[in-house]
Image (cartoon, rainbow, N blue to C red):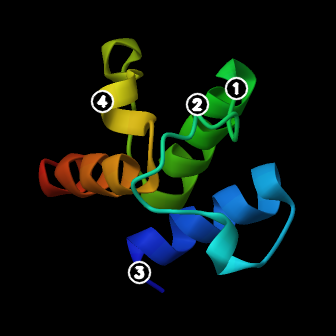
Amino acid sequence: MSIKQQIRQFILANYLFTEDEGKLSDPESLMGSGTVDSTGILELIMFLEEAFGIKIADEEMIPANLDSVLKVVSFVERKRAIR
């Protein structure tokens, strides 16, 4: 399963409570749409660290890295490349 598929499945299951792929647009703002709140971001970070073996520093916990499926995928790929 790809990074994007794993992230999409996590968000769909834990925040939208569905398996319907059509309910989540990859470029859509997770926070702006109300899909994820501040607590949800912390849960997403814990998932990313566990699922992909990365460590996310406090200064990396910004919308540019975590506010859409596409941004999260790109961030995880960058983090994994520098391990």
- Could you tell me which residue is drawn at 33 percent across and 35 percent down? 65
Kind of residue at disc 2: Met
Quadrant location of residue 51? bottom right
**Given this view, does label 3 or label 4 mark the residue nearer the observer?**
4
Left or right of 8? Residue 11 is: right
Left or right of 12? Residue 2 is: left
Say which of 48 and 65 sits in front. 65
Query: N-terminal of the two: label 3 or label 4?
Result: 3
**Residue contact at pointers 1 and 2, CB within 8 angstroms:** yes
Q: Position of residue 8 (x, y in %)?
A: 57, 66
Say which of 72 and 79 sits in front. 72
- Could you tell me which residue is drawn at 43 percent across and 70 percent down? 4
Q: Which mark is residue 31?
A: 2
Kind of residue at disc 3: Ser
At label 4, counting other C-alpha atoms closer than 10 Å, the crowd grade (few under 14, some 14-19, many 20 or more) is: few
Query: N-terminal of the two: label 1 or label 2?
Result: 2
Q: Position of residue 28 (x, y in %)?
A: 47, 49
Query: N-terminal of the two: label 4 or label 1?
Result: 1
According to the picture, the residue beneath numbered tag 1 turns out to be 37
Q: SS at mark 4?
A: helix
**Given this view, does label 4 or label 2 mark the residue nearer the observer?**
2
Say which of 49 and 38 sits in front. 38
According to the picture, the residue beneath numbered tag 4 turns out to be 64
